[in-house]
Amino acid sequence: MNEYTNQAIIRGMKLPIPDNRILSLAIFIFTMATIGIVLYMQYVMFLPPCGLCITQRIFIILCGLTCLAGAIHNPGPKGQRIYAGAAGAMTIFGSYFAGRQIWLQHLPEDQIPACGPGLNYLLQNFPLVDALNFLLRGDGNCAEVQFRLLGLLTIPEMAMVAFVMLFAACMFMLFRDQWEQGPAQG
């Protein structure tokens, strides 16, 4: 270990880097803020979520709950890496569904799949496996652009940015021991 362990050097200043427990709590707070924003969009801005939006929400929540569990449990280094890896996996799965929705939104109009029934109808009239399959594939509803942040980013593009940031934080927690120790001496 060197004298800069747990510190970042930015423009000559030594800044302390919080431990994994604090970072896990920060990730949990970030995910809950993200869910608060999408609930605001749903209930105040009246932007109904599509199947892929709901799936992305689930993975944001799972990432946050995994980090919360890691912060509460506060295990040793190996346990911290397991929690960070599990939370990172949730971000990978979530980014897949965000990417699928981004892809659907950029399809030419003649290639967009037909719109399907709503989630409530699916859950009431189809077996759960069929409803989940439909939910995970997306449909024409998922291709509709309902909102753009500053005229630039759509909702799934903002979700992708969030997933990338969360993934980076999880990977930092997962590999921080190696980064703090520096390159292996051979």
Image: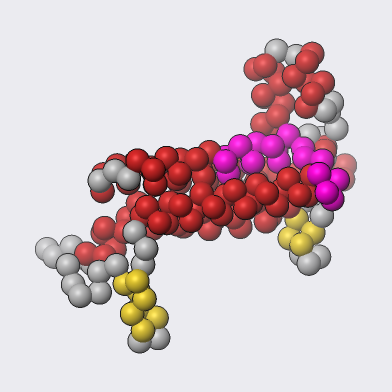
| Quadrant of res 13 | bottom left
Name which residue lies at 67% across and 43% down: 100
Name which residue lies at 31% across and 72% down: 7
Name which residue lies at 50% across and 40% down: 65
State the image coordinates of residue 14 (x, y, percent, origin top left): 33, 80
| Quadrant of res 110 | top right
- Report the side of 147 relative to 103 (left or right): right
Counting the numbered discs, the total is: 0
State the image coordinates of residue 136 (x, y, percent, origin top left): 66, 31
- Does any portion of residue 174 appear in the rendered image? yes
| Quadrant of res 139 | top right
Q: Residue extending furthest left?
A: 186
- Nearest the camera: 65 or 144? 65
Assign the magenta stretch its main secondary structure. Answer: helix
- Does residue 114 sit above or below 4 in this rendering? above
- Does any portion of residue 163 appear in the rendered image? no
- Report the side of 106 relative to 57 (left or right): right
State the image coordinates of residue 162 (x, y, percent, origin top left): 59, 55
- Nearest the camera: 171 or 63? 63
Q: Which stretch did the figure color magenta? A: 43-61
Picture quarter with the C terminus: bottom left
